[in-house]
């Protein structure tokens, strides 16, 4: 499985002529790394006396970030499966009108699945963005920058996934499906707007306060 590869092997394959893994899998991987960073902040917060008052909240956030991390890993594989299925359909015979119609129908089904996978990556990335701000607010200040990086990665995964949905959307013929996908894209974009910036702003403000505290103590 893709998630079991060594980093170098993954990157070598990514850079090769092989069409998979591609941008869709990388978007999911990026989302997984964002979630993993939030988990790290959580793990470095739980058990610390200084943060005992937020421990229950951090445990809740950690549980969610770990579920999201696993979801992204599954989506990495699903993206490759969707691509391979589409490519297999592309090779179907198209000599007769019946064959052409059968190929067209199957291609449309495959395109919808190919759009649904990155759409799910975008949904999960939005969930990561939703918890970044709370992790930044309540997490261990010594690793607060990692919450900010997690937000940046989550936004990158989100934007990458939305791009992949739009690319597949252009080839889908069923107008109702296209309309539904377009509406969800717009809704997701609206919900994601400003979330990364808010999390990063919290991180930067907390870092400034930490530096001021060090200066005063000196």
Image: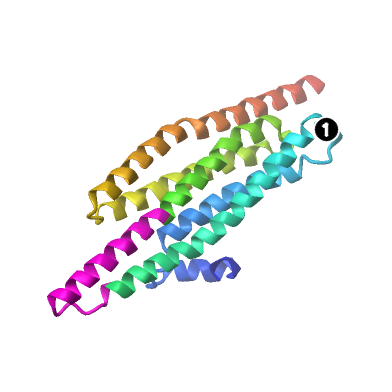
Between 120 and 151, the one lying in front of the other is 120
- Going 63% across and 51% down the picture, which residue do you hit? 67
The quadrant of the image that shows the N terminus is bottom right
**Vertical position of residue 218 compared to residue 30: above or below:** above
Q: Is residue 76 above or below residue 53?
A: below
Q: Which residues are magenta?
A: 90-116
Residue under the image location 62 percent in, 25 percent down: 205
Q: Position of residue 145 (x, y in %)?
A: 64, 38
Please provide percent x and percent y for residue 169: 29, 52
Residue 6 lies in the magenta stretch? no
Residue 201 in the image: state x and y as whole percent.
Answer: 56, 28
Residue drawn 83% across and 33% down? 52
Q: Quadrant of the C terminus?
A: top right
Q: Position of residue 109 (x, y in %)?
A: 32, 62
Name the residue carrying label 1.
Answer: 52
Q: Is residue 28 left or right of residue 202?
A: left
Crowd around label 1: few <14 · some 14–19 · many ≥20 (10 Å): few
Q: Is residue 112 magenta?
A: yes
Residue 55 placement: quadrant: top right
Q: Nearer the viewer, residue 174 or 164?
A: 174
State left or right for residue 196 relative to residue 62: left
Q: Main secondary structure of the magenta part?
A: helix
Q: Tag 1, which secondary structure?
A: helix
């Amino acid at each position: 499985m893709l998630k079991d590869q060594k980093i170098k092997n993954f990157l070598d394959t990514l850079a090769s002529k092989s069409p998979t893994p591609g941008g869709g899998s990388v978007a999911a991987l990026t989302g997984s790394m964002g979630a993993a960073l939030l988990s790290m902040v959580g793990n470095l917060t739980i058990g610390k006396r200084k943060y005992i008052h937020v421990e229950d909240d951090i445990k809740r956030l950690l549980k969610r970030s770990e579920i999201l991390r696993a979801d992204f890993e599954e989506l990495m594989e699903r993206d490759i499966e969707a691509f391979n299925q589409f490519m297999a359909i592309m090779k179907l015979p198209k000599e007769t009108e019946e064959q052409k119609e059968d190929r067209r129908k199957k291609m449309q089904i495959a395109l919808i699945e190919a759009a649904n996978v990155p759409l799910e990556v975008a949904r999960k990335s939005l969930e990561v963005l939703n918890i970044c701000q709370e992790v930044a607010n309540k997490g261990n200040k010594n690793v607060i920058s990692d919450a900010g990086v997690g937000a940046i990665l989550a936004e990158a995964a989100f934007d990458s996934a939305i791009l992949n949905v739009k690319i597949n959307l252009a080839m889908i013929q069923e107008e109702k499906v296209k309309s539904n996908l377009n509406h969800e894209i717009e809704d997701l974009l609206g919900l994601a707007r400003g979330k990364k910036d808010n999390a990063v702003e919290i991180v930067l403000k907390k870092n400034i306060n930490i530096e001021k505290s060090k200066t005063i103590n000196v």
